């Protein structure tokens, strides 16, 4: 499959990138790792005439911790995030999801910004970021704005980002002691597989090491966008952690999901898997929280 013809721009900084996007009145597309955009261009589902490559924009790199927050540059790859064990309590759940994305080759190219901007209902990195209450920073020549990730996804393949905006970074608050995360992905194959259902969980335990002070659950591939699971979270909050409680929360998570039937699986099967995967993700989160 050949790529259609296009002009390629290689800005060396964000200001120059915004100039190009403004010049083409939002008709130019940003290219990060290219693992999604170039594939779609080869399939001829999209045909942008102007591409703005971000590979020389250094402002989009780096993971920085300070002032109680962590900022992750949009161009950080899944491979680099999968190895972000240095700040395990904060980024452990993101590292787990990044490690499950595609193959080693894909992970070396695929960026966190690209994964969020594709807005696929089954994408892996939105789920840990939803349980971490992440925000994204969208910037353009007119300035920047911070948008909660739960408000960023507008539908399958759609976000609230404007065509002239670049997602520059992802921001999360540093985790409290006693916090741990879990991520579980189910595919038809063992590797190189987009999720049939995926789930992430984050638990913060009280000082007694047992009572759940904060609970977050997120689900993928069971609604038009990646979603939080408020019913499951309600079941968990303030209770003493146990396998029975996690099973109960897994059942409750079914009320949060709206899966469809497609060629990869039926809605009924997906709903059952929501329950199983939520329970497993919570169990992982519990184990990790007890170690912190
Ligand atoms: C073989 C294969 C396996 C895959 N497996 C998985 C998987 O298991 N899980 C999964 O979640 N995904 C998977 N993917 C999809 C893809 O790799 C990811 O979504 C990836 O994170 C996209 O990032 P990218 O940097 O390559 O984005 P690109 O392809 O460069 O861009 C994707 C889209 O985002 C826009 N964009 C990129 N960066 C920005 C930015 N900073 N600001 C504004 N817009 C931006 C682009 O304009 C484009 O519309 C797979 C893809 C392939 C080819």
Image (spheres, helix red, strand yellow):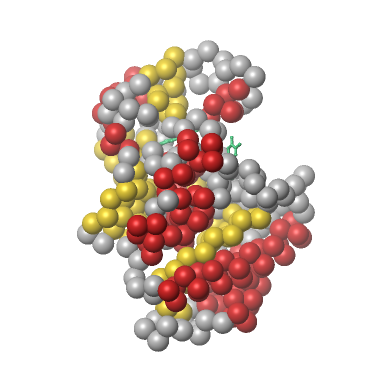
Q: Name the one closer to the observer, 130 or 103.
A: 103
Q: Position of residue 200 (x, y in %)?
A: 53, 61
Asked if residue 130 shows in the view, the reply is no
From the top left corner, tell me how far across and down residue 190 is, in percent.
Answer: 68, 50
Residue at the image position 27 percent from the left and 55 percent from the top = 65
User: In the figure, 189 relative to 10: above or below?
Assistant: below
Residue 279 x/y as whole percent = 61, 70
Quarter of the image where the N terminus is located: top right
Q: Is residue 60 visible?
A: yes
Residue at 57 percent across and 24 percent down: it is: 41
Q: In which quarter of the image is the C terminus?
A: bottom left
- Picture quadrant of residue 291: bottom left
In which image quadrant can residue 76 be found?
top left
Task: Give left or right: position of 169 versus 92.
Answer: left
Taking the image as shown, residue 267 lies to the left or right of residue 141, namely right
Q: Is residue 35 above or below residue 194?
A: above
- The answer to which of 86 and 222 lies nearer the viewer is 86
- Residue 121 image offset from top left, x and y in percent: 59, 48
């Amino acid at each position: 499959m050949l790529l259609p013809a296009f002009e390629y721009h290689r800005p060396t900084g964000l200001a120059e990138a915004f100039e190009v996007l403004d010049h083409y009145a939002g008709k130019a597309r940003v290219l990060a790792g290219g693992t999604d955009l170039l594939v779609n261009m080869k399939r001829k589902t999209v045909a942008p005439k102007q591409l703005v490559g971000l590979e020389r924009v250094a402002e989009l790199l780096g993971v920085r911790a300070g002032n109680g927050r962590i900022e992750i540059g949009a161009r950080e790859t899944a491979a680099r995030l999968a190895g972000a064990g240095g700040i395990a309590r904060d980024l452990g759940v993101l590292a787990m999801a990044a490690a499950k994305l595609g193959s080693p080759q894909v992970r070396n190219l695929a960026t966190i910004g690209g994964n969020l901007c594709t807005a696929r209902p089954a994408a892996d990195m939105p789920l840990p970021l939803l349980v971490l209450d992440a925000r994204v920073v969208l910037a353009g020549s007119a300035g920047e704005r911070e948008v909660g990730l739960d408000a960023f996804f507008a539908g399958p393949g759609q976000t609230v980002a404007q065509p002239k905006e670049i997602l520059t970074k992802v921001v999360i608050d540093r985790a409290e002691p006693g916090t741990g995360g879990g991520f579980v992905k189910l595919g038809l194959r063992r590797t190189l597989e987009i999720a049939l259902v995926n789930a992430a969980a984050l638990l913060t335990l009280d000082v007694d090491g047992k009572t759940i002070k904060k609970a977050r659950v997120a689900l993928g591939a069971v609604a038009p966008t990646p979603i939080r699971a408020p019913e499951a979270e309600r079941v968990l909050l303030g209770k003493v952690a146990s396998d029975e409680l996690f099973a109960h929360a897994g059942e409750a998570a079914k009320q949060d999901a709206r899966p469809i039937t497609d060629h990869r699986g039926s809605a009924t099967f997906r709903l059952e898997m929501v329950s199983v995967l939520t329970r497993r993700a919570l169990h992982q989160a519990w184990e990790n929280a007890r170690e912190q």
